[in-house]
Amino acid sequence: MGPERSRATTPFFRRADSARRLHPWLLALSSLVLACASTLVTVAVPHAPLAGASSPATSASPTTSAPALTPPGATLPTADQAYWLDASNGAVYAFGGAPQYGTMAHTVLNKPIVGMASTATGGGYWMVATDGGIFTFGNAVFRGSMGGSHLNEPIVGMAADPATGGYWEVASDGGIFSFDAPFFGSMGGSHLNKPIVGMAATATGGGYWLVASDGGIFTFGNARFYGSTGAMVLNKPIVGMSPSHTGDGYFLVASDGGIFTYGNAANHFYGSLGGVDEARPIVGVASLYDNQGYWMTNNNGGVTNFGTARYFGSTPQTIPSPVVGIAIAKGTGVATGSSYQSGSYGYDVSNYQCTHFPPNPHAIGIVQVDGWGDTATNPCLTQEATWAGAGLNLYVFMVYGTSATAEPGCTQSTLPAACNFGYQVGLSDYATAKAAIGTRATVAWWLDVEHAGTNWSKTTAANYSVIQGTLLALNKAEGLNTVGIYASPDVWPTIAGPNRPSVPYFAADWAKQNPQTICTSLKTTFSGVPSGPLALVQYSSPSYPFAAGDMNVAFDNDYAC
């Protein structure tokens, strides 16, 4: 198993039909209404692989009358609670306990990586480059590639054949290249309104779909046509697709995070980012094997989850090369991608520690930006950020408020005015931090949600709207990969009600307990906290006890789970 040697020189609301809809957490309006597609292609010109393909291609006429598909359940993973991201330099980022089988990040590539596909068992993956070079990891087997061959147009994606263990490559002109996988036809040599941007295989491997940047769908083998966005005016182009794993259908995703569902995938719409102000474009989508959810990623590795797909983390904020795809994996369900190494210790500080910083050494240094929303700026922000060093994270003390100025994604919130306020607070806090510490402001952020008293409304849904607004501003508008919630597990429900955002959670806990124990038991004891990974626990240290009335010498101790 390994890379192909010849290529490396020594990478919400809901309708019955498919439409762009908003994730319930984000509460943004859909910006498109689906129309009937006029770009249906039921007969495509067979196109054999170019010279250099290592396996013979056999052509077959595409059909629209294939029998219903039955997923090959025996070959599917027993769990799909994980995902991989791949970048153009061949780096692979593993989340949810997915094994890291290998990477091309330290190899000089002839051409950049443009996509990846996982094996039928979720135990490995292939990556494909624009020149058709294939790199294999885990139980993915190398069957050949177009590396070193002449291509009319660059390769833009690939799909694995669950039946044979082979795979297909697709070029932007619709040319298909098959390797130990049946050739059912292609669009190579045919006129296309827009270039092909991706493909997906049917559940049995008896066919495949191609999708163009306008959402036009082309069907081959037993892949059926269920609709497209080809006749629509899209806000942003389609960038990829994922098949319905339980039968006939597919999900399309646009670069603004709009999701379009067709066939039986239409029964599994769980939200989108359409209508949300996104700082970075979405580049891929991956659906669960039971179709009960999906993930999407932007080009900076920021992952958003929908349905029962769990959030396990995003890439570091700064990565060497852009992320180009996402693939489903078999994992343990253990969260990864925290700002801190598990087992590390440190502190969180605010204006109260201006003249008395916690002692060294420490790996964790979480610094307050503003108190009371975007007011009461920490006068020692710059100095405390210096003290934090490489372990810097930032936080803002949240309060309730409203604003009549509409903000992206807040229109359909329970209380839009509260969401607007939270959004504006997030933008203001980020601007304050950036002015004080520059690019270091792009670290992980925490929303301090506490003191269920006069600084919060008595209506928990309204309070949650404020929190949603700030999450939207920092995570989406500013493009920060990690934005989480700091709250005491018993206080969070009194402020935010039953809402459990799928974001990292930092547990406030003043008990003098072993934080390692808290990391393993907290979510079992408290079920109403944010549903994302438990990243940090705050605790009272015997060495530095919390002294009420003596805030200037009290230190909050933090432990990374």
Image (cartoon, helix red, strand yellow):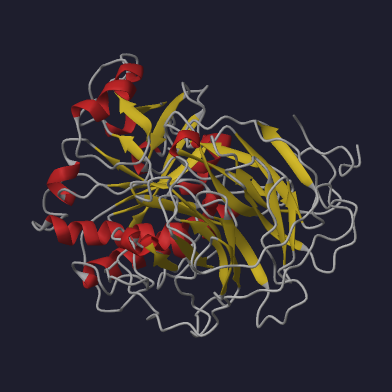
Left or right: where does residue 160 sit relative to residue 527?
A: right
Q: Could you tell me which residue is drawn at 48 percent across and 25 percent down? A: 342
State how many labels appear. Answer: 0
121 horizontally vs 406: left or right: right
Residue 19 visible somewhere in the drawing: yes
Q: Is residue 402 above or below residue 127?
A: below
Closer-to-camera residue (333/398): 333
- The front one of 538 and 414 is 414
Residue nearest the viewer, comparing 110 with 477:
110
The one of 508 and 198 positioned closer to us in this rendering: 198
| Quadrant housing the C terminus | top left
Q: Measuring from the top left, give residue 527's x and y in whole percent.
A: 20, 35
Is residue 356 shown to the viewer in this render?
Answer: no
**Where on the picture, by quarter, is residue 324?**
bottom right
Indicate left or right for 137 with 411 as reference: right
Furthest toward the left, the residue is 458
Residue 256: horizontal and vertical position, in percent? Answer: 50, 69
Left or right of residue 513: residue 445: right
Q: Position of residue 197 (x, y in %)?
A: 64, 67
Percent of width and height locating residue 41: 58, 77
Residue at 35% x, 41% y is 532
Residue drawn at x 77%, y 54% is 112
In the rendered image, which quarter contains the N terminus? top right
Instruction: Identify whether 442 is placed above or below 545.
Output: below
